[in-house]
Image: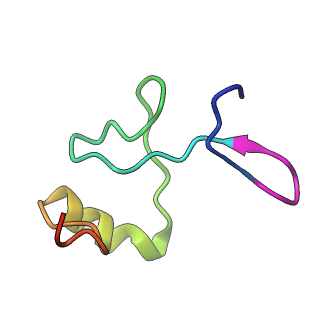
Amino acid sequence: MFDANFYDVQTNEEFWVSGPKRDRTDTRYGPSNPEIEPEAVETYDAFLEGAPLPGRENG
């Protein structure tokens, strides 16, 4: 991937990490369902409903 912003130090696999968007267009290219880790589902759902992301309460 020519524009990866992260890579796995063990496998050298490159990937793009994007911040969440309230309109659910969380992917870099094209429509897709984002994969949400189980421990983040509650926070992600709250974000979709208008809550700030943890650590970004002040902007």
Which residue in the rendered view is the most extreme toward the front? 59
Q: Residue 50 occupies which quadrant of the picture? A: bottom left
Picture coordinates of residue 9, whole percent (x, y): 82, 58
Above or below: residue 14 compared with residue 35: above
Magenta segment main secondary structure: loop
Picture coordinates of residue 12, whole percent (x, y): 85, 48
Which residue shows up at 38% across the image and 41% down it? 26
Picture coordinates of residue 33, whole percent (x, y): 43, 41
Which residue shows up at 70% across the image and 25% down it? 2
Picture coordinates of residue 42, whole percent (x, y): 31, 73
Quarter of the image with the C terminus in it = bottom left
Quarter of the image with the N terminus in it = top right
Left or right: where 45 falls relative to 35: left
Q: Residue 31 occupies which quadrant of the picture? A: top left
17 within the magenta span = no
Left or right: where 28 falls relative to 53: right
Which residue shows up at 25% across the image and 64% down it? 45
The number of numbered discs placed on residues in the rendered structure image is: 0
Q: Residue 46 occupies which quadrant of the picture? A: bottom left
Which residue shows up at 15% across the image and 67% down it? 51
* Colouring scheme applied when the structure was drawn: rainbow
9 within the magenta span = yes
- Segment tinted magenta in the rendering: 8-14
Above or below: residue 21 compared with residue 45: above
